[in-house]
Image (cartoon, helix red, strand yellow):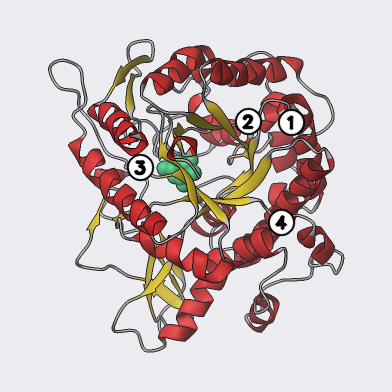
């Protein structure tokens, strides 16, 4: 690969940035209902307006290009395109994404488009969402509408963003809708349906012969075991089944991990929904590439006494809660005293970039990889000139990128890197205090965009790489 072919970009997701939640025929999404009505929406923030990408997309894409980036990763809102989740197509929704895609192409920016980034149409959520097998067909239909509408210009597709993290937050932590807590049956069922839906969408894409590439995005979760652990191999195997294998084996090898069903059955977890013919669906739906959202690792040790519990911090500095899980007789996540955490309890561990890339290569061979997200969330105050001096973000991202370069030197086929996020936007459940953007958004002043120090740093990094 030529250096100039490497994609350097940044990413957003529809619910987090578009706003325009009820404009131009958009249907209601699960996150609209959650953010408007749920007592679990702790700070009352919604994506109703967010940074209003719906009306600012030209400015955002031009700024991205001016920042030296040659690709933009974004997602489509399912209920903007199919307001009821299935059936009727909203032409105004199609027209909006046509404008966004055309604007990318006019600016020489490669669109990298995700079909599903957490925002399920409410009509489908009301029918048990991802726990209902019908979702598999519904997703394949939606995917086909999108490929036919945009596939002439979009050549890089992602089926689902972070199937694991979405299933985890919705069914284990309970902070994402539909807010089930420690529901292991529903967690695996959701993951299974996501794996099948993704595979079906891949098969639909192939049938259309559109001459592009299609992948899935996994939230990279490499498991590392703390030194004092009594049964390191056993708990590592369990944690890998829990976090990684179902999605990765299905997407890359086209099959369920061999150890999965026996292990679920042994643990009394429902598998009654698994059908023989599904193995054919999986086999026909292998991805062309893997996207990895790299933030941290899972650092674990044994846990045999005590009950199963999950901890999450959506309140940032306002909470002392640590982020993690303890699962009786399996393992618990633990803290490595030598690493830092952000104010929401997420570990900052740049080396996980290298470790995860090596591990994926060892397990799955030379599948092409895009780092589809990497970034740093913090509270921010602009200086007297209105600019955010986000040195902390720069230092942290530089660390991850250096490890990515090291993996590439070792031969790991990384094809692109996307910073999360293009500009400040809604952070799931946390709202607007936690910021990730390379560009600041002044939510008090008509969503004015002001590049941060990291925006210029990233531009320079890209230029140096391309030299
Ligand atoms: C990832 C999500 C993304 C964003 C980042 C911070 O889990 O894919 O939407 O919220 O975390």
> Where is mark 1, residue-wise?
146
Crowding at mark 2 (Cα within 10 Å: few <14, some 14-19, many 20+): many
Report, in whole angstroms, how far the alpha carbon at label 4 lies from the one at label 3: 28 Å
Task: Answer yes or no: is residue 20 visible.
Answer: no
Q: Where is residue 142 in the image (x, y as percent from the top left)?
A: 77, 36
> Is residue 464 left or right of 87 when viewed as pictured?
left
Report, in whole angstroms, how far the alpha carbon at label 3 lies from the one at label 2: 21 Å
Badge 1 element? helix
First reached walking from the N terminus: tag 3 or tag 2: 2
Residue at 49 percent of width and 30 percent of height: 71
First reached walking from the N terminus: tag 4 or tag 3: 4
> Where is mark 2, residue-wise?
76
Report, in whole angstroms, how far the alpha carbon at label 1 lies from the one at label 2: 9 Å
Q: Which of labels 4 and 2 is toward the front? A: 4
Q: Position of residue 80 (x, y in %)?
A: 68, 24
Report, in whole angstroms, how far the alpha carbon at label 4 lies from the one at label 1: 19 Å
Residue at 41 percent of width and 88 percent of height: 231
Tag 1 and tag 2, C-beta contact below 8 Å: yes
> Where is mark 4, residue-wise?
286
């Amino acid at each position: 690969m030529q250096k100039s072919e490497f994609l350097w970009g940044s990413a957003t997701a529809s619910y987090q940035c578009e706003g325009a939640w009820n404009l131009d025929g958009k249907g209601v999404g699960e996150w609209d209902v959650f953010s408007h009505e749920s007592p679990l929406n702790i700070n009352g923030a919604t994506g109703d307006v967010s940074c209003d990408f719906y009306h600012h997309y030209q400015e955002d894409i031009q700024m991205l290009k001016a920042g030296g980036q040659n690709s933009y990763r974004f997602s489509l809102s399912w209920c903007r395109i199919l307001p009821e989740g299935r059936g009727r197509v909203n032409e105004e929704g199609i027209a909006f994404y046509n404008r966004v895609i055309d604007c990318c192409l006019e600016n020489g920016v490669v669109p990298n488009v995700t079909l599903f980034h957490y925002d399920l149409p409410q009509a489908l959520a009301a029918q048990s969402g991802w726990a209902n097998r019908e979702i598999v067909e519904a997703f394949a239909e939606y995917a086909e509408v999108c490929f036919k509408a945009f596939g002439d210009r979009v050549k890089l597709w992602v089926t689902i963003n972070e199937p694991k993290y979405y299933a985890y937050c919705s069914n284990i932590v309970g902070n994402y809708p539909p807010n089930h807590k420690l529901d292991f049956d529903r967690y695996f069922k959701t993951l299974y349906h996501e794996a099948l839906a993704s595979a079906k969408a891949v098969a639909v894409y192939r049938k259309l012969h559109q001459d592009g590439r299609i992948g899935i995005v996994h939230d990279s979760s490499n498991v590392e075991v703390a030194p004092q652990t009594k049964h390191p191999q056993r708990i590592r195997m369990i944690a890998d089944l829990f976090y990684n294998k179902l999605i990765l084996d299905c997407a890359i090898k086209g099959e369920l991990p061999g150890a999965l069903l026996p292990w679920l059955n042994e643990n009394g977890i429902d598998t009654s929904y698994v059908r023989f013919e599904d193995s054919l669906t999986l086999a026909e739906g292998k991805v062309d590439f893997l996207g990895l959202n790299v933030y941290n690792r899972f650092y674990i040790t044994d846990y045999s006494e005590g009950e199963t519990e999950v901890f999450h911090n959506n309140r940032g500095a306002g909470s002392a809660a640590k982020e993690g899980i303890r699962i009786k007789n399996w393992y618990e996540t633990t803290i490595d005293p030598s690493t830092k955490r952000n104010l929401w309890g997420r570990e900052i561990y740049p080396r996980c970039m290298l470790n995860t890339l090596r591990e994926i290569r060892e397990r799955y061979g030379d599948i092409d990889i895009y780092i589809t997200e990497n970034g740093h969330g913090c509270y921010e105050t602009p200086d007297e000139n209105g600019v955010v001096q986000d040195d902390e973000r720069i230092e942290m991202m530089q660390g991850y990128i250096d490890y990515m370069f090291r993996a590439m030197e070792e031969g790991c086929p990384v094809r692109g890197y996307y910073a999360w996020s293009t500009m400040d936007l809604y952070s799931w459940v946390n709202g607007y205090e936690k910021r990730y953007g390379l560009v600041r958004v002044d939510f008090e002043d008509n969503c004015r965009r002001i590049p941060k120090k990291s925006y210029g740093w990233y531009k320079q990094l890209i230029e140096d790489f391309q030299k």
